[in-house]
Amino acid sequence: MVGLWDKPGIPHRGWRCVDVYDLREDGSTPEETNYATCEMCGHERIRFVHVLQHNEYENKIRVGCICAEKLTNNYINPKAKETNLAKKAARKSKWLSRRWKTSKKGNPYLNIEGHNLTVFPNKFKPGFWKYQIDGQFSKDSYPTSEQAKMALFEEFWGIISEE
Ligand SMILES: [Zn+2]
């Protein structure tokens, strides 16, 4: 596949990264992963997709790490974001099989990295689950304790990424 590098009218610098996402975030195997293709160079089997935007180009483009580095002229952040997403995916895939303890009230909890994480039944919405992180309750409820645990993971990851 020929990419956008050769097309006239495509800026080659001055792009901003607006998002990076992992196509294997759900813990699928390398064989199962639905890879992307870099729009700039046509490189196939991209796991981490960098979404770039440019003031003088109307569409966002989706590219791999090497093209993201060139187009944003940043040779640190694209790789660092991929490393962080890979860490997140590895951790997420083991999240449900961790040894969750059971509180006195019978709720699954974890004490990790200085945080108390619990999922518990929503007494106002029977059959649904909520979670709390250090005493802060989730806004939403989830149909299963597993879904509550996964939602908890997302918020927890956000917290520890900022620490
Ligand atoms: Zn590329």
Image: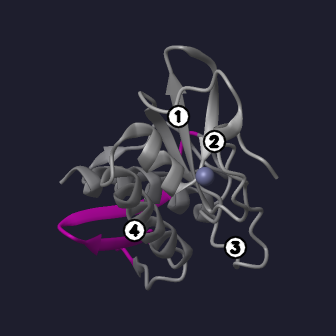
Q: Is residue 6 above or below residue 159?
A: above
Residue 62 disc label = 2
What residue type is disc 1 on? Leu
Query: What is the spatial separation of the Cα atoms under label 2 and label 3, in whole angstroms?
Result: 21 Å
Helix, strand or loop at mark 3: loop
Q: Residue at x 50, y 56 (%)?
A: 66
Residues at badges 1 and 2 in contact (C-beta under 8 Å)?
yes
Q: Residue at x 60, y 47 (%)?
A: 63
Query: What is the spatial separation of the Cα atoms under label 3 and label 1, in whole angstroms?
Result: 25 Å
The label nearer to you, 4 versus 1, is: 1
Residue 111, magenta (yes or no)? yes
Circle 3 packing at 10 Å, graded few (<14), some (14-19), many (20+), is few
Helix, strand or loop at mark 1: strand
Return the disc, 1 or 2, that comes first in the chain's sequence: 1
Residue 4 disc label = none
For label 3, being within 8 Å of ligand 1 is answered no
The label nearer to you, 3 versus 1, is: 1
Residue 28 disc label = 3
Choose between 79 and 113: the one closer to the eye: 79
Residue 52 disc label = 1
Return the disc, 2 or 3, that comes first in the chain's sequence: 3
Query: What is the spatial separation of the Cα atoms under label 4 and label 2, in whole angstroms?
Result: 48 Å
**On the image, which quarter does residue 136 sit in?**
top left
Query: What is the spatial separation of the Cα atoms under label 4 and label 1, in whole angstroms?
Result: 48 Å
